[in-house]
Amino acid sequence: MKYCDSYSGADIKNNSINQSNPLNLWSWLTYTSKTKTNFMLYDQDNYVWKTVGMGAVAGMRAMSAPALLSDELSRIPSMGLANSPLHFLQSDTVATGLKVLAATELLGDKIPDVPDRISPPSLAVRALSGAVVGATIFTANKDSLTKGAILGAAAAIAGTFASFYLRKAIKKYTHLPDSLSGAIEDALMFGSGLAITKA
């Protein structure tokens, strides 16, 4: 496995890093322009804010944030995670499994009478997701795993409540079907997640 903490536009131009083969919907959604060189894990100036952002994404959709993260790491592994307990996120198999779980979660969210995301079990899952994302980003940037986990979990909890009340407001003021308001939230979540990865 080739580890990488950073890479340049020349690397991509010379195809040493292949970003040009979107094989499925998730690959298309996470596709990055060949001219982009600033991915979410390898930015020493912004990784704290990226942790907050990805934690908030975890609050919106528990599986999407780690799926985005693992997809990135499976393509561009981080040397900082090589000896970390979080190195499993760099596996292609784990990345694929998380994509399947994320897609299942998106479908399940549209089912009527799904328990509220702010219920304790759901909130705990989202906080755990945010903690994993935060710990991974901090560790990849050679910072404290614990601090990253705490920040990611806190952001996920905040994102859970914010997205819950946003969803209710959309439904109340637009009278859209719940499935459509959920699709709007999905678009917001994906847009936010992709913007963070390219920031």
Image (spheres, rainbow, N blue to C red):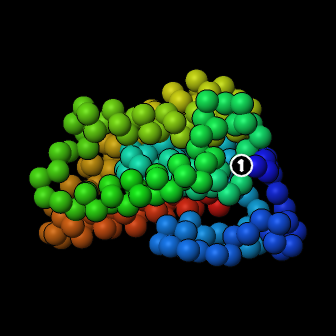
Residue 124 location in percent, x, y? 33, 32
Q: Quick check: 177 above or below 144?
A: below
Residue 174 location in percent, x, y? 19, 69
Residue drawn at the location 29% of the way across and 54% of the way down: 166
Choose top left, top right, bottom left or bottom right for residue 16: bottom right
Q: Quick check: 23 above or below 144?
A: below
Choose top left, top right, bottom left or bottom right for residue 100: bottom left
Residue drawn at the location 64% of the way across and 38% of the way down: 87
Residue drawn at the location 41% of the way across and 63% of the way down: 188
Residue closest to the eye, 58 or 4 = 4
- Helix, strand or loop at label 1? It is loop
Visible in this render: residue 192? yes
Task: Read off the residue under disc 1.
Answer: 77
Residue 195 location in percent, x, y? 57, 61
Residue closest to the eye, 193 or 170 = 193
Q: Quick check: 142 above or below 7?
A: above
Describe residue 18's horizontal placement relative to residue 159 as left or right: right
The C terminus is located in which quarter?
A: bottom right
Residue drawn at the location 18% of the way across and 64% of the way down: 178
Tally of numbered discs: 1
Visible in this render: residue 44? no
Describe residue 9's horizontal placement relative to residue 29 as left or right: right
The amino acid type found where label 1 is placed reads: Pro
Describe residue 199's horizontal placement relative to residue 80 as left or right: left
